[in-house]
Image: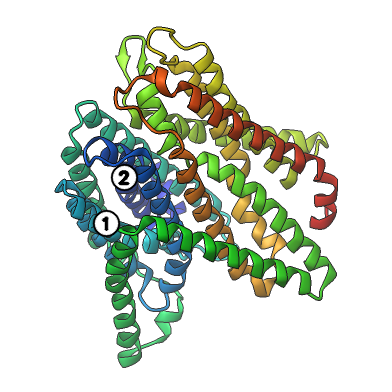
Amino acid sequence: MNRLQRLQARIPEGSAVLFMVQIFATLGFAVLQSTLVLYATRRLGFNNDQATLMMGLFGAFNYGLHLFGGYLGGRFLSNRNLFVGGMLLQVLGCGAIAGGSLAGLYWGLSLFLTGSGLNVTCINMMLTQRFAPEDDRREAAFLWNYAGMNVGFFIGFTVAGHYQLDELYGHIFWFATLGNAMAIVLALLFWRTLADRDTPLTLHRGAAFWGRFAVGCAVLVGLVPLLAGLLQRPGDTAIGMKALCGAVGLALLVLTLRHPVPDEKRRMQAYLVLALGSLVFWSLYQMAPSGLQLFAVGNVWMNVWGVPVAPQWVQNINTVVIVIGGPLLAALFARWRARGWPVDIPQQFAASLLLMGLGFLALPLGIHFADPATGRSDFSWLFLSYVLQSVGELLISPVGYAMIGRLAPKQYQGIMMGSWMLVTGLASLFAGDFSGMVEQPVDGSALSTNAAYATLFTQLGVGSVVMGAVLFGLRPWLRRLIGR
């Protein structure tokens, strides 16, 4: 058996297909995430506050529907069917937005978000079904899948930025349409290979199966007009979603205080404290496609060594840091732990908030040293900010979902996982609020907004550093709660 045959033998059937599917499935989200605010402000006439609020709802709906999609897939629709159905909605959504109308934007976003919100967990579910519980190849397969997602982001950001230089928004969204359509084509070509394995739905036959199938399809269709209506009332919708998140947080607090098992109660308390730290981090992190992008377009010299830099290309700083820095950071932590240096969850959360704060504090420095004639900051300050934020993401993101299995009692794991997703959705709404605080001047002059941006970034940066310091100070207490 030659080397290629040995490699193929180590890859379960369907894993390689899912890697390719992941690349194309990510393109539409990458395009919309990086272009929505620019399209709304520069083509549809939205002001900053309206555009960033829409971006906040985009993230909130996307993350909020993840949990529902995880429940729907494998119970009412197979993960395979839900993925293809969701991708079809994404294709229709990108096509509607490409039409260039305001109505097309609302209906396109509702179609896209229904699809992406419900089907994002399907690939992970299909992939994990390819491995037995004790299979040691699972971790490598998910690393490859994560790499495929980042390849998709890199391509999406790069192509969107290419067309953004000439503001060819129709080209941008048609590219997203074709990219997502390719994911459907691949899934259909390997339809049997991607079949679900050992899910609750596979236990049903005949009328029971088709009844569940009908319910799943009705959910897919029914969510679209619901989201379209909510998106057209963004202010009320944002308030309602914040109230919902607040109610969930209060319910979790009561659940924690009443929990009868002392050790589990202490771990639940640690979860609540770390969730607050996570909320601060992601609220700033998710300003990248909204407030930070508007700042880059209006207040930064988007040119490196004479080469124009498209706003979407800035997002690739994060992609590259994650792909390169992830393995390096994992090796560094392994070396530290081998030497007896503790690297624990509270420490990583505190460090991530410190890095996020420093990333935001780099921006007022750039404004201070900006060109006095134009008011535009050098691109290097924006680059530094994104690098610091991305390293912070590496510290907090991988441990976020993984720690829930350790901190949540078995009977509450689903609730606490869903609540962690809601934290990210709530953070998206706060990111929209922060991003809309600085109005762009009619003349487009950076000198008119630099002072406001410097104040905003300083306040956010200091807030994140303070939260990081508080978590670091609470580290001994949190370690006792967690049990380390």
Outermost residue, left side: 99
Q: Nearer the viewer, residue 280 or 444?
A: 444
Q: Which quadrant of the view contains residue 340?
A: top right
Residue 400 drawn above or below residue 310: below
Q: Which is more N-terminal, label 2 or label 1?
A: 2
Q: For label 1, count other residues whose C-alpha is less than 10 Å away and answer few (under 14), some (14-19) or many (20+).
A: many
Disc 1, SS: helix
Disc 2, SS: helix
The reply to whether residue 404 is in sight is yes
Q: Report the residue at 45% width, 55% height from top.
A: 60
Residue 253, percent from left and from top: 70, 66
Its colouring scheme is rainbow
Residue 372 drawn above or below residue 244: above
Residue 475, percent from left and from top: 80, 44
The reply to whether residue 191 is in sight is no
The type of residue carrying mark 2 is Leu
- Foreground label between 1 and 2: 2
Q: Is residue 190 left or right of residue 432?
A: left
Q: Report the residue at 82% width, 73% height from top.
A: 261
Q: Which quadrant of the view contains residue 230?
A: bottom left
Write down the residue under mark 2: 32
Q: Nearer the viewer, residue 275 or 121?
A: 275
The type of residue carrying mark 1 is Gln
Q: Report the residue at 20% width, 38% height from top.
A: 169
Gap in Å between the C-alphas at discs 1 and 2? Answer: 11 Å
Residue 172 drawn above or below residue 97: above
Write down the residue under mark 1: 90
